[in-house]
Image (cartoon, grey):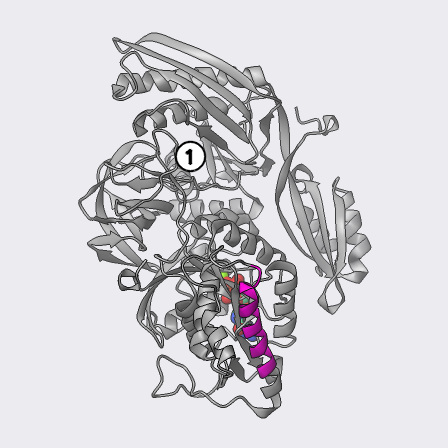
Amino acid sequence: MSSAIRRPIRNIGILAHIDAGKTSLTERILYVSGRIRAAGDIDEGTTATDYLDVERERGITVKAAAAHLEWSGPGERLRVNLIDTPGHVDFSSEVDRSLRALDGAVLLLCGVAGVQSRTETLFRACRRRGAARLCFVNKMDRRGASFKRAFDDMARMLDPGAVAIAMPWGEGESFRGVVDLVEMRAYALCAEADPSGVGMRPPPLPVPPDILDDAARARAALVEFLASLDEGAGRGGGHSGEGGFAAELLEDFVAGRDSRPEAIRSALRAATIAGRATPTLCGSAFSEASACFLLDAVAAYLPAPDDAFMPEARDPGTGALVASLDSSFSALVFKTVSDPSLGRLSWTRIWSGAASAGEKVLDARTGRSLRISRIFRIQADRIESADRAEAGDIVALSFGGASTSAGGTGATLCDPRKPVLFEEISFDEPVVSIALEPRTRQDIARLREGAAALAEDDPSIRVREDPLTGRVELSGMGELHLEVALDRLRRDYGTQAKAGKPQVSYREVLAGEGFAREDFDRDLGGERARASISIRIRPSARAGGISLVLEGAGKMPASLAAAVRRGVEAALSVGPAACYPLGGVEAVLEEISLPGGLSSPGRTGERAAEIAATLAATKAAAAAGSIVVEPVMRLELALPEDFLGAAAAAISGRGGRIESVEEEAGGRRAIVGAAPLRRLFGFATELRSATEGRAECVARFLRYESVPATAGML
Ligand code: GDP
Ligand code: MG
């Protein structure tokens, strides 16, 4: 793609283990780019991106908030869309959906703690989604910080592409600044900003003599790393168009001169975009200059939307891959937020083409047509209106007309003349639920409204209501997740509902494969409705949810495919063994026929197809048979050696097993284990008293396992 039409945009997210400094760094970035007047302080509870009350109070970022800022680095003026993502394990699906909107990510490490459990998960998620990466080692000013330790762990354990482009000038209490290895310049971070410079950068200094050797070695390692990428890669293989990453560096080498900064930058940019390199820098979220250098690196190395990896798109009628999205409009809704005054806003990444306010688009998953009523750009909790959005933009859309499930999280929006469908966003399955009992009649309405809004904003929350009693069952990914949801219900919707004890969510998995055919022929509201459908269902490799395969059934309009999908999903929400929802199922539509053909089924044809799909899928599931499974959690504990025995006893006392015990920095031990969630309620409290509060513990969903007969839950 020619650089003449490349839009100067970076869509990025900052990903980190909790407490690595993501919120602080985000604030500093907003501050240096002029978007906020004073950088808020997380410890004071005044930050711009942590905007829900509950988040302020708890000091954790629950919902991703997008910020839109402009940055004039040494090069062109850039627009940066920055998505703040949560660090807590209970909210991991929020991270995956943000990744679906991004082109590049900044992986943030704490300079003291280095690589942590969550860093690993985040790194893998980035790689899976094809997001290019930078790494920033933060808190270099904190006592015990070591850039070398963090960087070596990263390169050894996670990312062989990690390559240092900066090094600290002093560390911990003696931290003074950073050395830019590309330019070979030092910057004192506490110095006054350079009045002639851009943004809030301090003036460049020569590298101090006492660290000159180290810096020269690190720069040589950077050049060597880039040169090594071309070896064995085979010319033309992998990276397209150019004769290897380091062609310009080779020129310098042949000419016998020092590697030029431009040559390093261009090799590093190409390698980063290709996913082969992760440029790594360091600094402190408390310093304006660090935020400037990070933004410069974002500009220099992370992809513009035109450089980035494009997601796969399929034809919604046939399921076939679409070769190119060309200039037709296509976009993915990655999040919705219910705003009290603006209604529901759908946060959307535009992947191709453009759309203006007033235009009609198709929601390819539901087959519904939607009119875009307004387009917004977002700056933390403030919203700015726009007329038009085009490829590469991240915007919030609101739709005219009655509210429907169309345009919700995971929806593909497209040009009705060229329908396409992106891969659905997969959410962690809810594993815990609580029952909420309304206290008064008014409370029933408040609870119903609040729970519906929560589920709409966060698809990993499921809501089930008993219409007779008004009792609502809320399911989520962990105790904290539900606690935060409950807080929101109480504050934002004023419910007084009484909450029951958290319960484990069981589900069913198929015992084998099943097939069924349904010839539906009945009177529906005075019209004869007919549809014949054959469905085969089998266990799928994808752990969560239900995937529907349409290839082979013939070309059909998106609305008919959506009707079949609704029918199959309704059938599989009730398993044959014990009425728990089925998960990990692949349903193949082998045959579908309607009396008038598939091309224009009409409302009656769609209704008939939906019912036939429900009946066929129910019979196929019964034929396959199923077993009940329960969530098993992965436990990660870190604690002083003295408490190893107490912690091990606590884990085995809850039916868990220990998989590994490793030594960590500072003589602490890291335990990895697994235990059924059914036995883990109250575990955090028990562990706290058994270890005098010295243990940290995180539990996250690992997999479903069959329930032992002795568990007595059936
Ligand atoms: P998050 O959980 O990743 O969003 O991290 P926060 O931004 O909330 O920071 C966690 C804690 O680390 C807070 O107490 C911050 O003040 C502190 N912190 C963040 N960045 C730095 C840094 O660069 N240096 C030091 N010394 N502390 C930091
Ligand atoms: Mg935070």
Across and down, in percent, residue 532 comes to 38, 13
Where 360 sits versus 210, above or below?
A: above
Residue pictured at 40% horizontal, 34% vertical = 444
Does the magenta segment cover residue 220? Answer: yes
Q: Nearer the viewer, residue 312 or 570?
A: 312
Residue 406 visible to an observer of this rendering: yes
In the image, taking residue 230 as reference, residue 157 lies left or right, namely right
x and y percentages locating residue 501 in the rendered image: 59, 38
Number of on-image labels = 1
Q: Note whether 144 is above or below 316 in the view shown.
A: below
Tell me which secondary structure the magenta stretch mostly adopts: helix
In the picture as drawn, the residue positioned furthest to the front comes out as 254
**Residue type pointed to by label 1:** Thr
**Does residue 282 lie above or below 570 as drawn?**
below
- Asked where in the image residue 142 lies, by quadrant, the reply is bottom right
Counting other residues with Cα less than 10 Å from the Cα at mark 1, is it few (<14), some (14-19), or many (20 or more)? Answer: few
The residue lying at 30 percent from left, 41 percent from top is 413
Frontmost residue, 329 versus 576: 329
Left-right relation of 666 to 629: right
Q: Nearer the viewer, residue 692 or 515?
A: 515
Relative to 350, 268 lies left or right: right
Residue 392's spot in the image, x, y percent? 32, 55
Quarter placement of the N terminus: bottom left
* Residue 17 as seen in the image, left or right of residue 149: left
**Residue 685, horizontal then vertical, whole percent:** 68, 51
Circle 1 SS class = loop
Q: Is residue 53 magenta?
A: no
Q: Residue furthest bottom?
A: 209
Which residues are drawn in magenta?
Answer: 215-232
Residue at position x 48%, y 81% in the image: 255
The residue sitting at 69% across, 47% down in the picture is 683
Residue designated by label 1: 440
